[in-house]
Amino acid sequence: QVQLVESGGGLVQAGGSLRLSCAASGRTLKDYAMAWFRQAPGKERERVSGISRSGGSSWYADSVKGRFTISTDNAQNKVYLQMNSLKPEDTAIYYCAARVGASYPFWGQGTQVTVSS
């Protein structure tokens, strides 16, 4: 099975950018479709972006479309989430997850993103 570790979170002003990284070990990311989720305090977990195993197709929640970009680096065995034009409502803990079938059994520990107004 795959182990996932996120990094790259932090505190940024509104309008700024961050790039989150998710490093995989134990298995190659090419074995999985991947996704980024986030959870803000008091809110349900939200899937914000996903990418296919091949990297040929991606998906974004309406709330981040046009601002966030998901990508993979197979050589580094990493998946990234480039976040631009950040808003205070993007504040959350961000998680990467690997999909198996219709579920996401493998998760990282999360990285905090805080956007100040």
Image: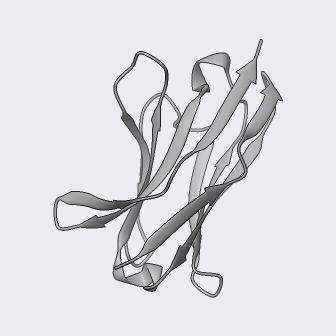
Q: Is residue 96 above or below residue 114?
A: below
Left or right, residue 59 beside residue 102: right
**Furthest residue toward left:** 102
Q: Position of residue 69 (x, y in %)?
A: 60, 51
Q: What x and y, as percent, mark residue 52? A: 37, 68
Residue occupying image coordinates x 72% and y 24%: 115
Query: From this viewpoint, is residue 51 visible?
Result: no
**Please, is residue 24 above or below residue 115 in the view?**
below
Q: Is residue 64 above or below residue 5?
A: above
* Residue depicted at 48% across the width and 19% down the height: 41
Give the image location of residue 5, x and y in percent: 57, 63
Quarter of the picture holding the C terminus: top right
Q: Residue visible at 67% across and 21% down?
A: 87
Q: Position of residue 59 (x, y in %)?
A: 40, 51
Within the image, what quadrant is residue 103 found in? bottom left
Q: Residue at x 42, y 83 (%)?
A: 30
Quadrant of the rendering where the N terminus is positioned: bottom left
The quadrant where residue 102 appears: bottom left
Whether residue 64 sits left or right of residue 88 in the image: it is: left
Does residue 117 show up? yes
The residue furthest top is 117
